Image: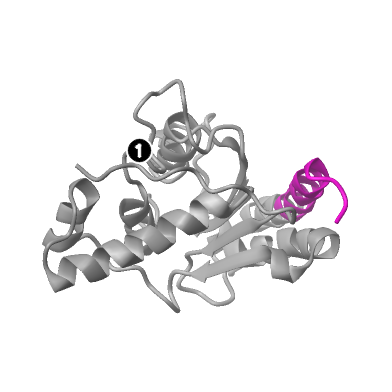
Amino acid sequence: MRHPRPKLESSPMARLLHIDSSSARDSVSRALAVRFREVWDKEHGPDSVTYRDLVADPVPHLDGDAVVTLWSEPYTEAQRATATLQNRLVEEILAADALLVSVPMYNWTVPSGLKAWLDQSLILGRTLPYDPGHKPLGGRPATVLTACGGYYGADVPEASMDHCRPYLATVLGQVLGYDLETITVWRTLATAGQGDARERRAAEESLRAGQEAAQARARAVAASFGEV
């Protein structure tokens, strides 16, 4: 079993880990993250951000070597390379005072690139707690910015089809213990011209609300660390 390493101490500068996962460069979820970053960068500076674009620089999906290194010391060259990647991902997470993830819904769930990042980063005793009562990342603010082509709110029968937001709430909030806020823009396909006028109006309202909420959340998170 791999021995857990001590939690990294935060630097005097508050640090943000920013993850983008949409394959579309003009995506709504990426645009929401830009709104968040405008506020954060003004308060803490762009140098305070570690950024990962999981499309431009994808994290490999779990293979046999990666599964081995999640649980034991590597013993082949391929496993050592995988362990090096996993260690870098884990250290980025542990060093970040706050987490920002932008994620579209693809086929009712998260993009596979985001799932791969989580799979390679969740290591027992480092990011994953041995003891559910003691979570290494517990209490740190995490913001998830989601965009969905349709509407899957709790007030419609289609709510059960959403395997994106509940999954991230389970992993980031319940398991890892982040202080999680999820901001969602609905009906993005309607804003792209699909749907009737009423749907398009609802989509536009959802987009405006999401943009405002992303900036408000950024102000709250940035302020929680005080001035630079």
Q: For this view, does 56 lie left or right of residue 80? A: right
- Residue 135 visible here: yes
Q: Amino acid at mark 1?
A: Gly
Q: Quadrant of residue 125?
A: top left
Start-end of magenta stretch? 209-228
Instruction: Identify the residue at image location x=25%, y=71%.
Output: 81
Q: Where's residue 122, x and y in %?
A: 35, 47
Q: Is residue 122 above or below residue 54?
A: above
Q: Is residue 165 above or below residue 103?
A: above
Residue of label 1? 125
Q: Residue 177: horizontal and vertical position, in percent?
A: 51, 32
Q: Quadrant of the N terminus?
A: top left
| Nearest the eye: 55 or 146 | 55
Secondary structure found at label 1: loop
Colouring convention used in this rendered image of the protein: one colour
Rendered residue at 17%/53% (across/down): 67
